[in-house]
Amino acid sequence: MGDRIFIEFGNYLSGLLALAGAPLLLNQVILMIVKIVGALLFILLNLMFIIWLERRLAGWFQARVGPNRVGPKGLLQALADVGKLISKEIIIPGAVDKVIFLLAPVLIFVPSLVLFAVVPFGRGMIPVDLNLGIFFFFAIGSLSIVVFFMGGWASANKYSLIGSMRAVAQMVSYEIPMVLSVLGVVMITGSLKMSSVIASQTQVWNIFTQPVAFLIYFAASVAEVNRTPFDVVEGESEIVAGPMTEYGGMAFAMWYMAEYTNVILVSAFAVTLFLGGWLAPFGWTFLPSWVWFVLKLYLLIFLHMWVRWTYPRIRVDQLMRFGWKVLVPLSLANVFVTGFGMYVFRGIGW
């Protein structure tokens, strides 16, 4: 029952709407709205926990005390921060483009929220199972590049503009090896559908058949979400706070939360592509499928945090060199080796 609790709830709601005489189209629209609200609740609850978790882990890694005053073990610190940020005034400098300036921190959330619609949270628990789910992920995810530039340009601040230009250069550069790393998985699976990718990992997860692709994807995803050691976009010692320099209060909080939302998103995508999605390891089906998905998700989020609080920030020239001269050639080589391996295995009848 635990594995189907959300599915049964959806069927129950659909049955109630049918009994109430709701047309089929209206029934489907209401169910889709419920799914979207459920995804939003999942994001918001996880955001508060992840922000607290990173602070605690940062204190642990650096042998210092993390949040420990507001609530037990500082669990309510995130709520206190929300209250503080909501109460702050959003100061708008005189020279900014007000419409774009205020629109950018709202739009930065849109691509991430849309992409959660194709994330398979458990068996039969994917809001929209598109045939081109992987393509949709990269197509919509790349739109955040435009929003970063909007925030920097509208701020009328040279530091914000430089930070946004760095963000554009970095995100475009690292999207290429990220896409190429996924090609190996698509070649083996033979499909761009999320559910098909998970179904193809019933016998062996893709992290074992595509270990190099997983490492490339993980490194590129850290750069995509602008986290250490690839956080040159927000290098405080160089350009203050990147494209967010002029933002305060909840406007800054939106940029801040978007980073963590993207961490959840790229980790969920990695779980789907490389870690079997909601499939239980070693046949341990005593837990619901969505629980296994969340456990794998938090394992990758922990790796993101571990990397952030272990390695120092690299220079922007080192960042670009690593992306273009290391990850891109390595990802192309992985595609070639994968194709050659598939040709050989098919030739011998495997």
Image: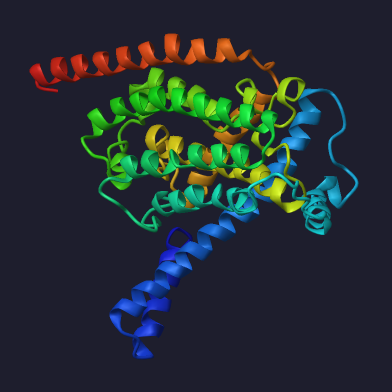
**Residue closest to the far right:** 69
Q: Nearer the viewer, residue 324 or 210?
A: 324
Outermost front residue:
95
Tell me, yes or no, if residue 121 can be seen here.
no
Tell me the quarter of the picture where residue 329 sits: top left
The answer to whether residue 44 shows anywhere in this view is yes
In the image, residue 150 sits, relative to residue 180, either above or below, namely below
Q: Quadrant of residue 263?
A: top right
**Is the residue 235 above or below the residue 252 in the image?**
above
Q: Which quadrant would the N terminus be assigned to in this image?
A: bottom left
Q: Is residue 261 left or right of residue 56?
A: left
Residue at image position (48%, 62%) is 36
Whole-percent x, y for residue 137 in the image: 39, 42
Q: Residue 297, relative to residue 222: is it above or below? A: below
* Among the 4 quarters of the image, the one containing residue 65: top right
Up-down relation of residue 113 to residue 37 (above or below): above
Say left or right for 262 vs 311: left
Residue 70, image x and y in percent? 88, 50
**Which image quarter is the C terminus in?**
top left
Q: Residue at x 69, y 19 (%)?
A: 310
Observer-nearest of 74 and 43: 43
Residue 200 x %, y %: 27, 38
Look at 70% across and 50% down and name the residue there.
Answer: 251
